[in-house]
Image: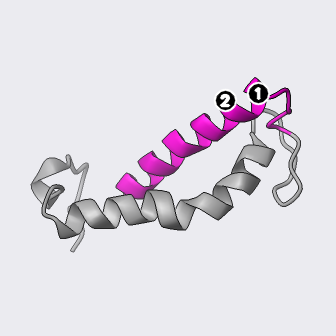
Amino acid sequence: MRCCRLCTAFLEKDISGALQGVGLDPQVGFLHADRPGRDSLAQDILEEFRAWWADRLVLSLINRGQIKPQDFCYRGKRRG
């Protein structure tokens, strides 16, 4: 789901900023491989928060009817 990816991207950038704010390098991770331009440590920490923050938020919005299929633009063939 693209909503989950969007929420995950926002959360990852917040985590990366918080790590930089306390003087840690967000690109030096333990679980994710170090690659140029990739915030590996931020992604390591994100794994702990993804399910109960990003996924839960998106599922709550869908269950409440606040997000509907009509709210999205589809490119090419529509799935499902």
Residue that appears at 75% across and 34% down: 19
Q: Position of residue 13 (x, y in %)?
A: 59, 36
Q: Are marks 2 and 1 in contact (CB under 8 Å)?
A: yes
Please tell me whether residue 26 belongs to the stretch shown in magenta: yes
Magenta extent:
1-27
Residue 24 vs residue 9, the one in the foreground: 24
Q: Position of residue 72 (x, y in %)?
A: 20, 49
Q: Position of residue 77 (x, y in %)?
A: 22, 60
* The quadrant where residue 46 appears: bottom right
- Label 2 environment density (alpha carbons within 10 Å; few <14, some 14–19, many ≥20): some
Residue that appears at 43% across and 46% down: 6
**Magenta span dominant secondary structure:** helix
Q: Quadrant of the C terminus?
A: bottom left
Q: Amino acid at mark 1?
A: Gln
Q: Position of residue 17 (x, y in %)?
A: 67, 29
Q: Which residue is mark 2?
A: 17
Q: Which residue is mark 1?
A: 20
